[in-house]
Amino acid sequence: MHIVDSISSLFLFRSVPERNLQELCILAPPILFPAGATIFEQGAKADVGFLLITGQLDVFVQGNTGERRMVGEIRAGEVLGEQALFSKACIRTASVTAVKDSQCLLLSDDLFQRGSENPAIIAIEQHLLGTLARRIRRTNQAIQKEWRAEDIAQAGTRELSFGQRLRSLFGSGR
Amino acid sequence: MINAALMKQARTLLDNHHFPGMSLDDLTKVLMAGEVRAYGNGAPLCREGEPGEHLYFLLTGRVKVLHSDSAGRQRHLSNIDAPALVGHMALVDGSMRSATCLVEGSAQAVTLSRENYGTLLHESGTRGTTLRRLLISSLCSQLAAANSHIQNMLNPPEITEEVEATSNDNDAPQAQRAGAPKPNQRGDSFSEKDVLAIAAKLGGWSSDLNEIEELELVADDRLQQVKKKRRP
């Protein structure tokens, strides 16, 4: 399948004319990452983002103990590493590798400046707004879940804490 | 015609954001599409659960962000200091307000109505581009802050004497006062005398502090035991 066909099949570009997608591919020729290739490494300095056109990527995070955990997967149509373009002095917070042969568009500062009026770039920006809002809501839900867990733990403690149980059995030293 | 006062405010907004093609003139034009308003202490910019009708470019002052927990209590989530965007999430994804934002002290903001926001957002010119990219930049910072918040909840940083001496942040974990009984993970606190009394009754040991070299009470979900070492 031709690359423009792959791009035009992505939902975010559903209303973008083909000539604008062709122009996008000229401004940012897609890059092929073979299966197993590293897209970027945690801790590396970042100055570009990516839009996955075909394939699949895995996201890994390495903790302080050195343990490497997979924390998510990225599918066609998703943007990754966008913080590099929209934050100051960005450092990658995760590593990303290709699960299978994957094609990506390189989202650079230059692309956004030269293509700012291209409907395909506007579509990427609007897609990013929705994606980020969703991620923030998901993170806020996780915070609320933690609050609930804390409340349950505190309620349990209020009912009969370990200290209270000990004191009821053995009395207080005061 | 460019408004000089708004241009000055736009500069401070730009200093706190980063995006491709940042332009002072273009951001000033975005601000000019809104209306400058002053807010007094406690004034609500938005209330949780209500539909989003405005987006705010906070130019001066501070906003307190409150969020209801499952029991309906208002929790202080964070503070937003100018220059910053406030109340944009509900306009971006069309959802209800996820938090209540109250002004602390006094504040000044440019308010952009939902209608103007919608018009600008779909513009292909420089105003639309600037608004979209400023919003993305703001959401990126917000996401990074939310991720950091949840990481701190899951792995709270260790409390140090230095934190206790300097922290005035309402969000900071409650500092442990020197000399006070140290709470364990479940919030129980034990004085030395408590521990000695419990240990003595458990093992029939003397509760005389001089006879005991080390006494440790371990309160753990899996293991609840009293350890004691005697002096040789």
Image: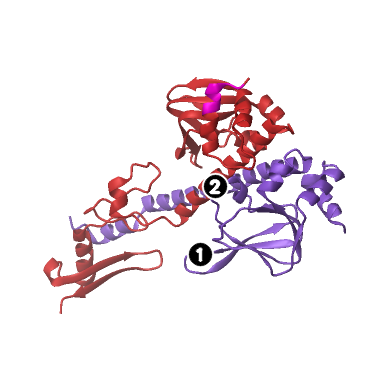
Residue A88 visible, this angle: yes
Judged from the image, the secondary structure of the residue bearing numbered disc 2 is loop
Quarter of the C terminus of chain B within the rendering: bottom left
Judged from the image, the secondary structure of the residue bearing numbered disc 1 is loop
At label 2, the amino acid type is Lys
Q: Residue at x 29, y 52 (%)?
A: B162
The chain carrying label 2 is A
Magenta-tinted stretch: B2-8
Residue A7, given in percent of the width and then of the height, sits at 81, 52
**Mark 2 nearby-residue class (10 Å; few <14, some 14–19, many ≥20):** some
| For residue B219, side relative to residue B47 (left or right) | left
Find residue B88 and report its image quarter: top right
**Mark 1 nearby-residue class (10 Å; few <14, some 14–19, many ≥20):** few
Quarter of the N terminus of chain B within the rendering: top right
Q: Nearer the viewer, residue B150 or A88?
A: A88
- Chain corresponding to purple in the figure: A
Q: Is residue B5 located in the magenta-colored stretch of the structure?
A: yes
User: Distance of mark 2 from mark 1, alpha carbons?
Assistant: 23 Å
Residue B28, given in percent of the width and then of the height, sits at 60, 27
- Chain corresponding to red in the figure: B
Q: Is residue B11 located in the magenta-colored stretch of the structure?
A: no
Number of numbered discs overlaid on the protein picture: 2
| Numbered tag placed on residue A88 in the rendering | 2
Q: Is residue B93 above or below residue A48?
A: above
At label 1, the amino acid type is Gly
| For residue B119, side relative to residue A40 (left or right) | right
Residue with the mark numbered 1: A63
Marks 2 and 1 belong to one chain? yes
The image's colouring method is by chain
